[in-house]
Amino acid sequence: MAVVLSLSGSPSAASRTSRLLRHLDARLEANRHEVVPLNVRDLPAEALLGADPGHPAIARVAGLVARADGIVVGTPVYKAAYAGILKALLDLLPQYALAGKTVLPLATGGSTAHVLAVDYALRPVLSSMGAAHITQGWFVLDKEIGSGPDGRVTLPAATAATLDELVDRFSASLTATTAVPRPLHVAG
């Protein structure tokens, strides 16, 4: 069983990005992973805007990142890039906070004009933070993320199938990574 940090970079309380991530969290849990959901918007603004890596809330997030085997990073796309609140958090984490991690990047937005934001905006910063493996990311149109009468997320069948496949590949990558014994450091 791997530990997955599911990180929503949306500043909105009524976020489709966050709802989509919580929907995908359930699939990861069904694949027997421990999922820790985190909404960046719930972190103290003074810590993010004041660039305070020593703030207890930021230190807690750094600890969650360090503990995680994998990280799902979801963000809405604004002006062809990921959300500024997500960037503020990523800037406060250690330079190689994602070293050894498997990462699944996801983005949501109002137009297919932003579909490349995953690969041209988000993926480079995740790579610069040392992610060991960044799985195929995906962009979901806002209008495709609906709600059923019970409040559950609804998606068009093709979108749901694609996301299921991506999450399952991410899950398989985590399982393969956590199944490999880590070498012991032997003093010489």
Image: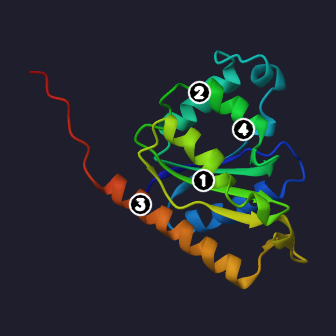
Q: Which residue is mark 1?
A: 119
Q: Which residue is mark 4?
A: 86
Q: Which mark is first along the chain, 4 or 2? A: 4
Q: Position of residue 136 (x, y in %)?
A: 53, 61
Tag 4: amino acid: Leu
Q: Which residue is mark 2?
A: 93
Kindly indicate the quadrant of the structure image that contains residue 143.
bottom right
Q: Position of residue 149 (x, y in %)?
A: 91, 77
Tell whether 15 sits left or right of 173: right
Q: Which mark is residue 103?
A: none
Q: Position of residue 96 (x, y in %)?
A: 47, 30
Which residue is found at the position 80% from the left and 37% from the top? Answer: 42
CA separation in Å, label 2 and label 4: 11 Å
Select label 1 or label 3 by which is in front.
1
Residue situated furthest left in the rendering: 188
CA separation in Å, label 1 and label 4: 16 Å
Which residue is found at the position 78% from the left and 61% from the top? Answer: 113
Q: Is residue 51 above or below residue 21?
A: above
Q: Is residue 37 above or below residue 108?
A: above
Tag 1: amino acid: Asp
Tag 2: amino acid: Leu
Q: Secondary structure at mark 4?
A: helix
Q: Which mark is residue 173?
A: 3
Q: Secondary structure at mark 1?
A: helix
Tell whether 49 sits left or right of 63: right
Task: Answer yes or no: is residue 6 visible.
Answer: no
Mark 2, other Cα within 10 Å: few <14 / some 14–19 / many ≥20: some
